[in-house]
Amino acid sequence: MNKSRVFSLRRRSGMTILETMAVMSMFLLFGIMATGILRAVTELGSRSGEANRVRRSVMRLADRIRTDAKTAEDVAADKGTFPLKIKAKETRIEYELDATGSSLRRSKYHSGELVEVDSFALPSGKSYQISFDDSILSIALGCGEQSACWVIESSIGS
């Protein structure tokens, strides 16, 4: 038998460079796909956490506004938006937007002296509308095309 023919029939014991490169390319492709999936899941979790934080903040804000409005003798809002001013006996409460419009600050004054400050994260949308009459206060937060609208309603006075 020919020596070259015997050599070609013998089993190889290793991998060629081409096979090694193909395997490494597949591992690289799997790594890139896994990184993309991990980034997407992380971003989704972050957005979900932010939405939950804003939801809790708006619920807390709604409780505060309802409590304040029930004791109110006078309610005022400039041009149907913030600042919102609620007056009751010797107490004055002001709700004001921060400079970025991403949070609302509640300041409570008693006999002209600041006694309490609180802050509430607001939903994105930058659209805030306040309407009121003699008996109902209504505040719409974050109304926009891309986001849900939060509406807080309360009776004014006892």
Image: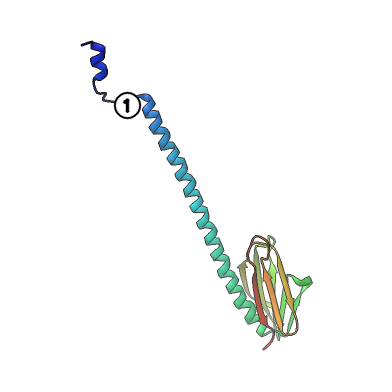
Name of the residue lying farthest toward the right: 79
Q: Residue at x 37, y 24 (%)?
A: 17
Q: What is the crowding at mark 1: few (fewer than 14 residues within 10 Å), some, or many (at least 20)?
A: few
Say whether residue 86 is visible.
yes
Q: Quadrant of the C terminus?
A: bottom right
Residue occupied by mark 1: 15
In this rendered view, identify the residue nearer to me: 93 or 29: 29
When the figure is inspected, residue 15 is found, relative to residue 108, above or below; the finding is above
Name of the residue lying farthest toward the top: 2
41 with respect to 149 (left or right): left
When the figure is inspected, residue 121 is found, relative to residue 94, above or below; the finding is above
Q: Quadrant of residue 145?
A: bottom right
Name of the residue lying farthest toward the bottom: 158
When the figure is inspected, residue 32 is found, relative to residue 141, above or below; the finding is above
Q: Position of residue 79 (x, y in %)?
A: 79, 71
Q: Position of residue 70 (x, y in %)?
A: 66, 84
Q: Type of residue at label 1? A: Met
Say whether residue 114 is visible.
no
Q: Quadrant of residue 101?
A: bottom right
Q: Residue at x 69, y 86 (%)?
A: 157
Q: Residue at x 47, y 41 (%)?
A: 32
> How many numbered marks does the figure carry?
1
